[in-house]
């Protein structure tokens, strides 16, 4: 059992289960589900104007047309702009269970999860959140059935290609962290292209953790520091928390420490995600499966975060 000393309040942050909406997936003639179908059902809970993406499927290729609004919107009632987290991290859990509950293949749950991610990105842009980090695929996930792993790699590649232009126009910077050496060569090349294309965008940084392990992140940082010490570039007394932080994979962002971590599906653990970076992160656990996580649930998580006192070991007078 993983045990962390995290500064979390004693209040109950596990939200009660909510009615599950009907499936919003659209089946194509080839019995495949579209990533962002033009006829997608958007639940009423999304009380903002979502610039819905439309798809054109031809010869096995998926193109997406859709825009992220360039304007920030007024925050929902109860949220304070001054208290909004700069960095939100999300463990997107429950895609498989969501699909099984509906008698659909696991792949359908993953595709529905991509839509939920796009909606969350839209909300972060509109509400001024600066960094969104999502756990898309862990290093442990490689032990899953090969057919599922292959589908996830293909889905990730298709989603990156289809959204690249939209993200670029929306001012979104995309960074990918994790052991990329295990990824298909075509996906590695695409990640490099996407990161280069969006590196100057500053509205929102979307960090996607793929083949990622929090333990390995710390290990690779230690190896890098040891290599520098071996060659005399640093001395023993130079090694401190700041140096380790610079060697972690989240050195790609100005805000490496999430203010808020959200995990869906009712699981109450961090599952080897950002172990160093979560030292003082506030945690919020939601019962909803990831494809059902929307605006209402995000507002609930943000409201909970804003009601907490972050003392970092100190004491308010």
Image (spheres, grey):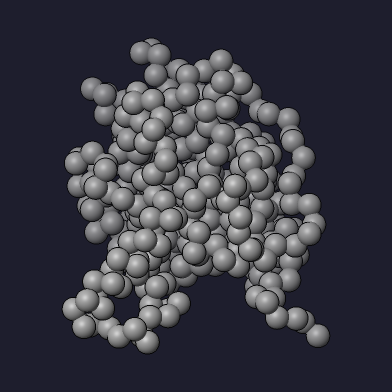
**Is residue 132 something that shows in the picture?**
no
Q: Residue at the spot x=37%, y=61% of the render?
A: 219
Left or right, residue 168 beside residue 241: left
Residue 314 in picture, x, y percent from top left: 70, 80
Judging depth in this view, the residue of 87 and 219 nearest the camera is 219
State which quarter of the image contains the C terminus. Answer: bottom right
In this rendering, the answer to whether 74 lies above or below 316 is: above
Q: Residue at the spot x=22%, y=82% of the render?
A: 233
Task: Residue 260: name its quadrant.
Answer: bottom right
Residue 82 in picture, x, y percent from top left: 65, 73
Left or right, residue 176 beside residue 82: left
Residue 285 in picture, x, y percent from top left: 67, 48
Q: Residue at the spot x=77%, y=82% of the render?
A: 316
Residue 30 in picture, x, y percent from top left: 36, 13
Judging depth in this view, the residue of 212 and 46 nearest the camera is 212
Q: Residue at the spot x=46%, y=67% of the render?
A: 256
Task: Residue 177: name its quadrant.
Answer: bottom left
- Give the total number of marks visible in the rendering: 0
Left or right, residue 243 beside residue 183: right
Left or right, residue 107 beside residue 45: left
In this rendering, the answer to whether 65 lies above or below 276 is: above
**Is residue 134 something that shows in the picture?**
yes
């Amino acid at each position: 059992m993983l045990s962390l000393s995290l500064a979390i309040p004693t209040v109950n942050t596990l939200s009660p289960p909510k009615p599950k909406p009907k499936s919003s997936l659209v089946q194509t003639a080839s019995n495949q589900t579209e990533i962002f179908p033009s006829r997608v059902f958007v639940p009423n809970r999304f009380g903002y104007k979502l610039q819905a993406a439309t798809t054109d499927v031809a010869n096995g290729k998926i193109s997406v047309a859709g825009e992220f609004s360039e304007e920030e919107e007024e925050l929902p009632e109860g949220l304070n702009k001054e208290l909004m987290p700069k960095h939100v991290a999300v463990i997107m859990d429950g895609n498989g269970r969501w699909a099984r509950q509906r008698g659909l293949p696991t792949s359908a749950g993953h595709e529905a999860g991509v839509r939920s991610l796009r909606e969350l990105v839209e909300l972060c842009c509109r509400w001024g959140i600066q960094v969104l980090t999502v756990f898309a695929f862990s290093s442990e996930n490689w032990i899953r059935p090969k057919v599922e792993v292959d589908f996830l790699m293909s889905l990730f590649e298709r989603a990156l290609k289809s959204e690249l232009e939209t993200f670029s126009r929306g001012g979104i910077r995309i960074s990918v962290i994790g052991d990329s050496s295990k990824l298909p060569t075509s996906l590695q090349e695409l990640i490099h292209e996407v990161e280069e294309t969006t590196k100057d965008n500053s509205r929102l940084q979307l960090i996607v953790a793929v083949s990622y392990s929090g333990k390995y992140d710390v290990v690779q940082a230690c190896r890098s520091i040891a290599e520098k010490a071996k060659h005399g570039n640093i001395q023993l007394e130079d090694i401190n928390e700041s140096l380790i932080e610079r060697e972690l994979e989240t050195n790609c962002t100005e805000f490496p420490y999430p203010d808020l971590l959200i995990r869906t599906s009712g699981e109450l653990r961090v599952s080897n995600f950002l172990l160093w970076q979560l030292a003082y992160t506030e945690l919020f656990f939601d019962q909803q499966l990831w494809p059902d996580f929307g605006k209402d649930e995000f507002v609930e998580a943000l409201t909970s975060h804003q009601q907490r006192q972050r003392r970092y070991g100190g004491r308010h007078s």
